[in-house]
Amino acid sequence: MRRAGFWIYGLLGAFVLGSAFPFYWSYLVASRDSGMLTERIPPLIPGGNFWANAQRVFDSVEFWKALVNSVIVAGAVTFSTVLFSTLAGFAFAKLRFRGRDPLFLFIVATLAVPTQLGIIPLYMSMADFGWVGGLWAVMVPNLVTALGVFWMRQYTLDAVPFELVEAARMDGCSMIRVYWHVCLPAVRPAAAFLAMFTFMTSWNDFMWPLIVLDAGNPTVQVALEKLQSGYYIDYSLVLAGTTLATIPILIVFVALGRQIVAGIMQGAVKG
């Protein structure tokens, strides 16, 4: 097998450095004071003020509560989206029932509707339920997404052969056991990618939590907005909070990235 050349490694290295530089720059500013931004040649070595700036973040806003709220919201939304999307994807891909194709087309068509159009009726619905100000108002509207259903349906079409489903049914498996023991192991790489994408999207969501949550019950992105809401913006303080808010996303990426790579390598070996 031919090994990758120097230019391939060089391009990959440049891509990695370019991707990591924004996070490094956030940490660099967070480890110093805002005066470094006015210097003609900014330093490229971190200072020693990161933990002091991080402590100021927790003193300025309810950042611990915001982190806990974001973990609860992103975790619940990710779990429900992966569960319901894999179930719906399996049903649309491998089961035959009346109205299957029109229903799937309707789900895909909802992707063309801008999210902003539904904010007012959605807020009115949350108010009728009495959920405004609480985390339920953020979690419930995002328990499943049309994109997740579409993604899992397309992947399940090729990853789970009809013969395998029929063989499991002939062995006496119920349809839910076929989903659990046959479908889920086969679509694990796609489910891991969907989980990572959903967690990142929910963690970074700003507009809807800003509208529907109380000021004393924020998520991370709303708390970060409060750090820069004054007349003078302390960028060391803001980027310290941004760096802290990025760490959970990196942890999820490392945990689920292994599943994605393992699935890709397994498929390559089978191919």
Image: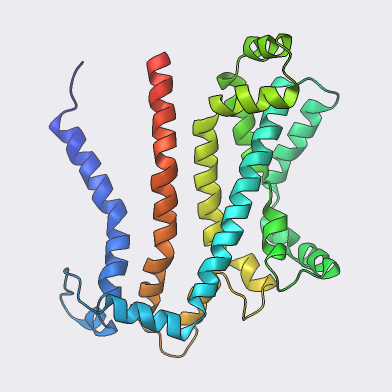
Q: Quadrant of residue 150?
A: top right
Colour mapping used in the image = rainbow
Left or right: 49, with 190 as reference point: left
Residue 37, relative to residue 262: is it above or below?
A: below
Residue 218, relative to residue 109: is it above or below?
A: below
Q: Quadrant of residue 195?
A: top right
Please tell me which residue lies in front, 151 or 49.
49
Q: Quadrant of the N terminus?
A: top left
Left or right: 143, with 158 as reference point: right
Residue at (54, 61) in percent of width and height: 71
Residue 39, image x, y percentages: 19, 81
Residue at (21, 77) in percent of width and height: 48
Left or right: 158, with 139 as reference point: left
Residue 119, relative to residue 166: is it above or below?
A: below
Residue 189, image x, y percentages: 49, 32
Q: Quadrant of residue 57?
A: bottom left
Residue 148, image x, y percentages: 62, 40
Q: Quadrant of the C terminus?
A: top left
Residue at (18, 23) in percent of width and height: 3
For the question of whether residue 92 can be seen, the reply is no
Residue at (29, 68) in percent of width and height: 27
Please tell me which residue lies in front, 187 or 235.
187
For the question of whether residue 182 can be seen, the reply is yes
Total marks placed: 0
Left or right: 58, with 40 as reference point: right
Residue 237, image x, y percentages: 37, 80
Q: Residue furthest front?
A: 172
Please tell me which residue lies in front, 85 or 178.
178
Residue 267, relative to residue 202: is it above or below?
A: above
